[in-house]
Each structure stands twice: as structure tokens, then as C-alpha cells.
Amino acid sequence: MTEIEEKQGDFEMYFGPAHPGSGNFSVRVQLRGERVMKAVVDPGYLHRGFEKLMEYREPMQNSVLSDRICVLEPLQWNLLHAEAVDTLMGYDIPERAKYIRVILAELSRIQSHFIWYAVMSMGTGFTTGFNVAMGYRDYMLDVFDYITGGRLYPAGYICPGGVRKDLPEKAEKKILTLFEKIDYMHKFAKKENPAWLERFKEVGVLTKEEAIKLGATGPILRASGVASDVRRDDPYEIYDELEFEIPVLDEGDAYSRYLIAMQEIEESKKIVKQAIDRMPKGEVKTPNMKPIVHFRKAKGETYTRNELSRGEGAIYMIATGKKTPYRVKIRGPSFTHMIPILKHLLTDSYYADVPAIYWSLNQCPADVDR
Amino acid sequence: MKLSVISEIFKNLFKRPMTVLFPMEKVEIPERERAKHKFDIDNCISCGSCAKICLNKAIKMVEVKKEYKEKYPKTYPQIDLGKCCFCALCQDICPTGCLILTEDFYLATFDKDSIIIEPLKI
Amino acid sequence: MSVVEKEKNNYKEEKIVTALSKKLNKKVNIQRKKRLWVSIEPKEIVDACSIAYDMGFEHLSTISVTDWIEKNNFEIAYHLWSYKEKMLLTIKARINRENPTISSVTSLWSKNAELCERECHEFYGVIFKGNINLTPLMLEDWDGPPPFRKDFDWRKYVQQEYYNESNPREDNYFEVKK
């Protein structure tokens, strides 16, 4: 990239970290009039060093830690960590536990996409959308509370070797009534909004080649025309037995990202309904009753990938026969979305488009910093 | 379908609010809620596994006060709620089930000392 | 999945393994389903990555560094995913711990590789030759050793800097582990 010469009248603006809704993340944009000449991204406000913390703790404790990686989708991170340990330990997960894991992960995806809709509407001044989405998300949190015992943080509910407790009575019924409840919100969000068309259409266009080169994953990549989904390409749990579609759009702009999110909610609902129908009865944990993983038996390494609601999440774990993992590398999906892609999209855009681009990327500063 | 503002407003006029008026009304707390600890000292065998598994070191094995030492001679878990992350691993690992997490989530306090749960309540 | 399909999948992996082994002149191993790995010399890294890139491994998932302190080296692993073959290839290179220098792959993955290398540089002190932007990313005002190295004892540092042994609420952080 060529360095831009500074001219008189150029100025710098801070977008975040004290911006409502930007999260713990900051972007410095250099402006010439209304145009963004250069964007400098400044992460690190939420760096907690999970990779190092996990080296000091045992897998069962790490599973509690793992849901703190991203505040907006803790259950999916739980699942990812549990899977990494399962592969290393060679656990054979009971069939019922797999179904419970998938149901919770998909519910978490719907919930996370609601937040996406909420922050997108708040960023463009559509406060009603924010209120509606966050309100209906709360009904979902009530169900999480009912199943896992915590509204936001399941605290290692999806643990290595299965899940910690079986679904409570009537949980299936509760999930289905929940779908009826949130149906209004989903319909509301799907409606064509003239203000959004103005703000998001043809803004922040990411072409297919750029998306692959800059490491886009998940909904961002699918909005740019690449049909790639870890659930389909690299199936884990029971995803290869379920029927669902992968929405793909070719435009690559902010509006198509929003459309992808709306279609994904539909698909996730389908998955949950199928899983509830097919769920067998039986054990939910490997026979080991105590919450202890005998990690000394594990040796080797694994690179486990999962489709989180924001994109591809991965854990690279190495075990050397000690109580604790030797090395844990966490790849958050927002890491590439928020730094190279955001920089690329912001360069040469208008300042008024900055929030639209920023929120259309479904950001989560927590998994950038980790 | 287009989003129509007027019809949404009229629909919402006749809807019940999503929130509740907190002190008067309460949301139902499910059975599995993980909140304040309850410790039953008579069943405790002082194995210390809760202190070992606690990932924040919120549990410390301590001795009870001198007056009660005859009755309870061993060390018992003292829980610091300020460090606790309410993961309920201690509840799961407890062999006798004497340490459980209750549904009592009213934990806000002005007094720093009150966040420590002593093994023996007097 | 039917038996025929399973055989087909295995066949696919082996086909790629033979093609890659031939081009890289190294033995490519199958770790498990859809996971391949190869160990190479550090000076070959750019060539190996570009060969893999041409074979369809276009997506750089991440770059990770592992500190093998007993063997006195860093293992740098490049995790590449292929959208075409739907397979993950891990390219590993070991470099000396005293002089941790390796060529940068920014020529292939531009900003994405630059960012991953920046992170590795910050946390492990690995120098990527050819990467012009190795500025601090997440840590603020940090001038100690790279914090994720194994010889940097995080717990000891925190005990010294932030905790007080005489405070009854913090004294159990100082207990020596058996």
C-alpha cells in the first residue's frame, strides 16, 4: 500500500473504545473531508491471555474458562473446547449428548444473530430494532438459564466427554414454544427496511478473491459468494446427518451480510427442530462421573475447527502427557474480520459509512483479543 | 414485505411489556440456577477436592473458630464470592453433596467482608 | 455415511498426499480424517506455502508458535484450509530459540499473514523477515520478555506485581503447588 501524504486540513477521528456499541475496540480513522484515507485498528482492550491461562489449568477448568472467550456466543466456544479435548482423549461421546450439544450451539447462533441485528440497527440509528432484538434475545437467555443454569455463561455445560447434566424435563417443549415467541422478532427483522437499504446497500463491498485472501470466514465469506461452512465441509458432532442449507449471496456488501444472517436463523431453527425430533434417550456423559479429565493419558495434537456464528473458530491444542495442555492456540473468527478486512473496507469509504461497515462484520472484540 | 412503522406502533400499543417491575414482580428462577453457595458442615469430610478444582482459588480450606474446634476439628471450605465464577464444579465434585449452589442470587452488597462465606454460620 | 463414500474420501486424501509429497519432496502425513501435516526446513517455508497455495490451500486459518523449551526451539505451524479439497494442511517448521528468524509469508496472504505474524512476534518474539509491520498489537506499554514463552512465569510476575501476601484474601495465590 502506498503511504498517503498528509495534507493540510486532514484530521483524525476516534471510533471507539468509548463509542456506544463499538465494544472494547477502537478504530482511528484519518479523514480528508468526508473521506477515510486510512484506518488504524487498535485492539487489545480486552486481552486476557486465554492461551496462557489454559496452560496453567486442567481441561475441566478450561472448559469453564472457554465460555469467557466470546461474551456473545459462549455455548459455541464451550463446544469447540470440549471437542478439542475429546479428540485428544479419544472420548466416545454418547449419542444423546451430541444432540444436546448441537441444539444448544444452534440456539446460541440464533441468539448471536439477534445481537448482530441489534447492533446493526443501533449503529444506523434504528433504536427500535435494537430494543426488539435484545428483548426477544432475553427469552432465549431464559431457556439457557433453564437448561444450563446460567443466563449468559453456561460455565462449562458442554464439557469434555458429553454435557454436564441431561436436559431438564420439558426442555424440548420450552424450546419449541420459544420458537413461536421469537417468530415475531424474526419476521420483524426480515421486513424490508427503507432506511437500511439506503445505509447498507453497496456499502463495504468485499469481493470473492479479497475475502479468501484476507481470511474471511463464516457469514462474511458466504455473503461474498463462497459456499463454505465448517458444518458441511468438516462435519463435527451430528451435522453430517442433518439436513440444512447454506445460504450464499454474491453481492458481498453490508446488506447481503444482513440477509445471510436472517437466512441462517431460519436454517438454525430447522436444525434444532430436526435434532429435537431425532434425539435418542440414554446417557449424556461418558461413564466417568466426576468432573475430571485424566489428561495425562492424552498425547499428540489437534486442530479442531467449528462454525461459530461469526465464522470459523479453531483451537490448536498440544498435549504432552501432563495434567495441563502444553499449548493452546485459539483462533477467533473476528480476528481476521476486525483487523485486515475492516481496514480494507474502511479505506476510501465515507465517514458516514464507518458504523455500517463496522457492524455489518458481526464483530466481537472479545475474540479478537482473547 | 416492507416495514410499516404505523402498524407496528398500533400492534405494540396493546402488548404486554417485556420487562417486569422488579421488587414487586419477579422472574421465575429455574431450579438449576447457580448462585450463592450453601454449605452443610456436618456432612463434610474435609477432602479438599473443592479447593483443588476451583479455577479461581475462591475456596480456601480453613479451620473453624476455637470454640467449635472440638466439634469440628478438621479444615473446611471458606468461599470468597468475590472471586467465585459460579461454575458449580465444586458442587459436581463434592463426594458427599454437602456443598451446593442455591437459587439465591441477591448477592449485591455494600460490605466487603460479607462476601466471604464462612464454613460455620453462627 | 456409506462404506463406498468413506473409501472415496480416503482415496481423496491419499491422492493429495502423494501429489503434495512429490512437489514438496517431503513425507506428508495423515493425522486423522481431513487433517494432513508436513514438517519442513525453515528456509523452505515460502516455497512450501506457495506450492500448497497453488494446490488449493488458499485459506490461512492461523499461524501458531509452540515453545519447545527442552529442545531449545520454536515450532511454527501454518494451518491452511483448502476450499476445493476440504482438507486442512499444517506446515510445521522448527527454528532455533536463540535466533528465532523465519521468512514472512506476506507475499501470499498479504494483510492476513501480516496480522498473524504480528501476533506471533508480540507473544513469542519470533522475527519474520520481510514483514514490515511488526509493531505491538495487543499489549500496551509492555517492555518485558515476550509473555507467552515458557520461561516467562506469568504467575510469579503477577504475584510480584499485583498481589500482597499479607492480605488474607490473596494469600492462597502464594501457596506452593505440590
Image (cartoon, coloured by chain):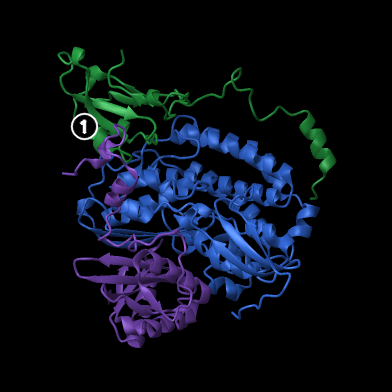
Chain colours: A blue, B green, C purple
Residue B1 in view:
yes
Q: Is residue A240 left or right of residue A214?
A: left
Please identify the quarter of the rendering in which residue A99 is found: top left
Q: Nearer the viewer, residue A246 or C93?
A: C93
The chain carrying label 1 is: B
Please identify the quarter of the rendering in which residue A247 is found: bottom right
Instruction: From the top left corner, tell me how far across and down residue A225 is, in percent.
Output: 62, 69
Of the 4 image quadrants, the one containing the C terminus of chain A is bottom left
Q: Is residue B112 left or right of residue A16?
A: left
Q: Nearer the viewer, residue B66 or A65?
A: B66
Instruction: From the top left corner, tell me how far across and down residue A195 is, in percent.
Output: 79, 53
User: Which residue is at the far front?
Assistant: A8
What is the count of numbered marks?
1
Name the residue at 22% across, 66% down.
C69
Instruction: From the top left corner, tell me how far across and down residue A308 is, in percent.
Output: 50, 55
- Amino acid carrying label 1: it is Gly
Name the residue at 20% across, 52% down.
A296
Q: Nearer the viewer, residue C138 or A345?
A: C138
Q: Is residue A278 left or right of residue A225?
A: left
Residue A95 in view:
no
Instruction: From the top left corner, tell me how far across and down residue A45 is, in percent.
Output: 50, 53
Q: Secondary structure at mark 1?
A: loop
Instruction: Decide: is A240 above or below C18.
Output: above
Say which residue label 1 marks. Answer: B48
Of the 4 image quadrants, the one containing the N terminus of chain A is bottom right
Q: Residues within 10 Å of mark 1 (few under 14, many from 20)?
A: some
